[in-house]
Image: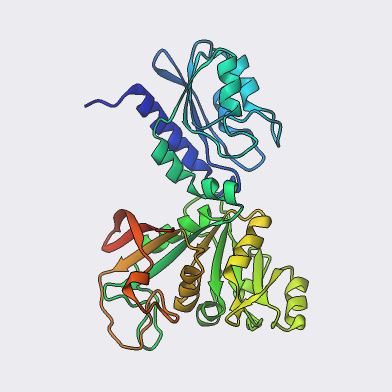
Amino acid sequence: MAESADIRFMKRAIELAGKGFGLVNPNPVVGAVVVKNNQIIGEGFHEYFGGAHAEINALQNTDTEGATLYVTLEPCNHFGKTPPCTDKIISSKISRLVIGVKDPNPIVNGKGIRRLRQSGIVVETGVLKEEIKKQNEVYLKFIPTGLPFCALKTAMTLDGKISTFTGESKWITNEKSRQFVHELRHRYAAVMVGLNTVIKDNPELTDRSDHSEKKHPIRIVVDSNGKTPAGSKVLDTEIAPTLFAVTENADPGFVRHIRKLGGDVIICPARNNKVNLSYLMKKLGEKGIDSVLLEGGSTLNFSAIEEGIVDKVFSFISPMMLGGATAHTPVGGKGIGKLDQAITLNIDSVQQFDSDLLIESYIIKD
């Protein structure tokens, strides 16, 4: 059965929106397509934070009278960093507007739709709504709650190990899988690790994706007592910005040293002598950090899941086995004692990167 024109053109708008990943945070990614006589006469997307919105970029053609505009997210009706998109849409004399998802931002949230309908434009909503909601899952959590969307990334063998019993872990997954992780770093506003990962791997935690314009995430190091060794790559704030999360137990000299190097520090209350991650997420949200990719070790991963900050899990599985009773698994820590208390997930998709599998799933929350 042939798909409708509305679905076909909205798919193109979704494709365009994806070009904004990593470049517009904490704004949503948005795409727009202008169609007249069943032909696309204009396209646009939100290209960078503070720049023109997708609708404005799409409505550059002057011959738009009577056309249909497809946009993935409800147009704004207020002055922000740019003028209201509704003004441009009305002056373009389009006759019909097709919207994927209503904007949950209280300053928008139906106001754009209402004004456009009052101007005489036919407005329809909900086309490919679920696809667009997933594309903007970060924005759709961050705006109503003020909390970052947190995705946990793990990489393990078929028997559930993240390293050999001697600690060797490079590389469990293949090159294509690792390249996709860099795509995730490009998309997420921040990447978070614990002190053990810094000591063991000394990572840069930068965006080495295929994008011509790199967007290095803010590097967040959870270092409860301020023990990050000198010479660690995360201390070089000229490469990428770094934020340390410590507790009140951290040496004030360490905090001063980090700030002198140009890094940021959040002093958090302790939970079981470790950084209270729920508090940290609240503070990150207040700084406008809308998303966090957690690339921690097994201890930090369990703490994050236990505190309920994780929304999504990217699980890479490599077709090898390592065994070893002492070899680490993706989620360690104390663990859960009873099956009826297990953290449960909804599997959203499974894809393959050569011989590796990637399972994307969402934590089921009460």
User: In the rendered image of this protein, does residue 329 appear above or below residue 317?
Assistant: below
* Residue displayed at 40% across by 40% down: 131
- Farthest residue toward the left? 1
Given residues 287 and 164, the one toward you in this image is: 287
Image-based side of 199 in relation to 362, left or right:
right
Residue 56 picture location, percent across and down = 60, 27
Residue 155, image x and y in percent? 38, 69
Q: Quadrant of residue 54?
A: top right
The quadrant in which residue 261 appears is: bottom right
- Give the image quarter of residue 79: top right
Where is residue 218? Give x, y as percent.
Answer: 61, 61
- Residue 158 horizontal side relative to residue 204, left or right: left
**Marker count (numbered):** 0
Residue 56 in view here: no
Percent position of residue 259, x then y = 76, 71
Relative to the observer, which residue lies in front, 317 or 288? 288
Residue at 47% x, 78% y: name it: 299
Residue at (63% x, 77% y) in the render: 270
Image quadrant in which the C terminus is located: bottom left
133 in relation to 33, above or below:
below
Location of the N terminus (image quadrant): top left
Q: Is residue 206 above or below residue 99?
A: below
The reply to whether residue 180 is in sight is yes
Look at the image and name its color scheme.
rainbow
